[in-house]
Image (cartoon, grey):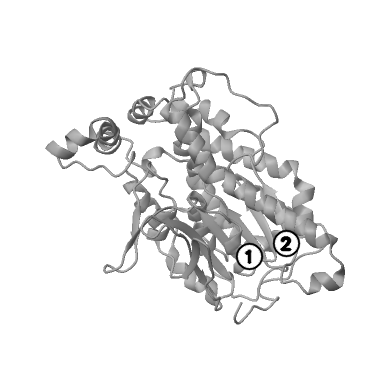
Amino acid sequence: MAGGYSAGMYETPLTGLVLSGGGARAAYQVGVLRAIARLRRETLGPRSRLRSPFGIIVGTSAGAINAAALACHADRFEGSVEVLAKVWQNFTADQVYRADSLGVIRSGAQWLTMLSLGWLIARWRKARPRSLLDNEPLSRLLARMVPLERLPMMFEQRQLLALAVTASSYTSGEHVTFYDTGVPVEPWSRSQRIAVRSRIAHDHLLASSAIPFVFPAAQLGPADGAAWYGDGSMRQTAPLSPAIHLGAQRLLIIGAGRMHEPAGRQLPTTGYPSLAQIAGHAMANIFLDALAVDIERMQRINRTLALLPDHVRQDTPLRPLESLVIAPSQRLDDVAARHLGSLPAPVRTLLRGVGVGSSASDARGGSALASYLLFEAPYTQELMALGEADVQARRDEVLQFFAWDRQPPPLHRAAAGGALDLELP
């Protein structure tokens, strides 16, 4: 890292926050962060509300939106978490995508029709729907929820070292990490994945959260060389890599699904799998599997380094990386199955066409797909409550990871900002 950083600016060791993707499942992350903020205040006192424990924040897909919102208010950590909580606990699907009958007909109904009669429509009409759902409302929500104009001030005040969000380029086939920092950091390049330093904009968040087939791709770059991007969880072979490249010395990783299923678990056979079951399986591969594999890789490297003699370990560029992984203790597919009736009627009708039932008893395996699209308060509130409960169950681990059970971390050397208004404009 060119320029480096001073230990007095941030809590030490420098902690990175990694927020994975998962659509509506990202409500779980907010519950985890809310519990951590509360635990921190109880342990360190009210002054801890004013600074973020994370010098580096990295997010993918819906996690990128949460990450950017936290980064923009790094000077008011607990307040920023409460802003996020207020949004997620009062969510309705129409804040993210068109859930009215006309909107569903214009996007999802035409898209499904294209699958069966695409050649006919292509010949007789010029209807080219781009996705199952139209996420135009999300742009308006981001404008209110994520004030990116504050980000340069967070870097200047040294409240934050780096923010990174990831997207997948349909144009080049590469996985791209867009990052902005308060100190110079050289971009990195690996096989099929690159880093680009850029001023983060709402378009980056839309690109990172563009779930394939479900939401339309987003265009990024200059008019004469713009490329199309989709969800950053696609082709993401190393989800932890951006935080490590940016200088994180330890990682808090918040998943959006169980890292490991119980041994021997098997769903009952109900005939040929529906499109919804296949889509849910594909999304699990996109959003969950890469994170689990990368965490296992990191743990394996740590174990290998621990076996090396000191003089050998000093000669390798690899360093052990402390981490804490918090992931749902319940299957979010099962949680979603209990809330299928919360979806707007036009969306329920659309999803029924690909095999998603309308109730828990009729889920037919399609609840996995619905779990990513259920931006409805009953579901998101239950996920937030689960996140808070999971942190409370691992209270001692969290305290030990942050060393809050021993002594207060060093304070930021940063100017105190104004009070954070918890009302969205």
Q: Is residue 34 visible?
A: no
Q: Specify few, some or many for label 2: CA neighbours under 10 Å numbering under 14, 14-19, or 20 or more.
A: some
Q: Position of residue 400 (x, y in %)?
A: 79, 55
Mark 1, other Cα within 10 Å: few <14 / some 14–19 / many ≥20:
some
Farthest residue to the right: give it.
309
Residue type of the residue flagged with mark 1:
Ile
**Dots 1, 2 in contact, CB < 8 A:** yes
Q: Is residue 350 visible?
A: yes
Judged left or right of residue 34, residue 72 is left
State the residue in front, 346 or 3: 3
Q: Say which quarter of the image contains residue 407.
A: bottom right
Which residue is found at the position 35% from the left and 55% from the top? 218
Secondary structure of the residue carrying numbered label 1: helix
Q: Which residue is mark 2?
A: 321
410 sits to left or right of 213: right
Q: Position of residue 342 (x, y in %)?
A: 44, 29
Location of the C terminus (image quadrant): bottom left
Query: What residue did someone put label 1 on?
Result: 244
Instruction: Find numbered disc 2 in the image and state the secondary structure of the residue it sits on.
Output: loop
- 5 horizontally vs 192: left or right: right
Q: Residue at x 40, y 55 (%)?
A: 207
> Could you tell whether 410 is left or right of 381 in the image?
right
